[in-house]
Image (tube, rainbow, N blue to C red):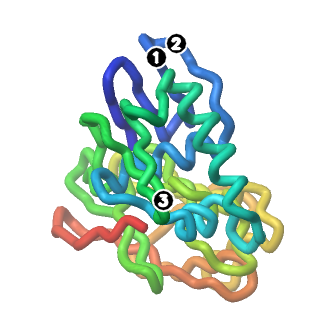
Amino acid sequence: MRYAFDDFVLDGDTRELLRGGRVVPLSPKGLDFLELLLRERPRAVSVTRLRAALWPHTHVGATSVHVLVSQVRAALDDVSKPPRFVRTVQRFGYAFCGAASGAVARDEPSAAGGVFSISTGDGDFRLRQGDNVLGREAGLAVRIDRPGVSRRHALIRVEADQATLSDLESKNGTFVGERRVSAPTLLRDGDELRLGLKVTVVFRRSEGEETETEAR
């Protein structure tokens, strides 16, 4: 996803915050926080959800979120009163309050007219041309927040009318069926992909058919 607001651009693919074409230093969690708020705008995101998304399976207090918000505001030259971009929702959480545009949809079809997607228990995630990372980290093309799945577990690269799967040095491995992936592997419609020991998703390819995408 790529978002433009004011003179900033948040590029989810390159994992960079840009201002006037120059990189603005921001931590990985700061990028995740900002991307989550942009994706959910104008809806407010609760502190509870932020903690779950940014620190999965780790207990942190509200102070951790407050510190992160301060870092993001500093990177954006923002202030709390009145906010330009990050609005505090009292006793709830935060929301992106600025004007933003230019989000590139994840349901971008391939150049050959094919549509690629991943079916999980949380919905269907359309894959775009180029690199699509699967894992627990917030803001990924296919976020799978399950035990045994690494933060950045695997990569599906879509090039024209084909897709290949690679493991990203995950702790518990990536499999197509029962075969462990050790090199880029060509995917076919209906392939069952296993991330780690227990999480199974299905790769789908259709010829230009519209399928619902649920980004989570």
Report the side of 15 relative to 126 (left or right): right
Mark 3 crowdedness (10 Å alpha carbons): few <14, some 14-19, many ≥20: some
For label 1, the SS is strand
Q: Is residue 108 above or below residue 171?
A: above
Task: Answer left or right for 109 relative to 84.
Answer: left
Q: Residue at x 35, y 36 (%)?
A: 3
Q: Which residue sits at x=43%, y=68%?
A: 216
x then y, percent, for residue 74? 58, 26
Q: Are marks 2 and 3 in contact (CB under 8 Å)?
A: no
Q: Which residue is mark 3?
A: 93
The residue beneath circle 1 is: 19
Q: Earlier in the sequence, mark 2 or mark 3?
A: 2
61, 56: nearer the viewer: 61
Q: CA distance from mark 1 to mark 3?
A: 26 Å
> Which residue is nearer to you in this view: 61 or 18?
61
Decide if residue 170 is on the left or right side of residue 42: right
CA–CA distance between discs 2 and 1? Answer: 5 Å
The answer to whether mark 2 and mark 1 are in CB contact below 8 A is yes
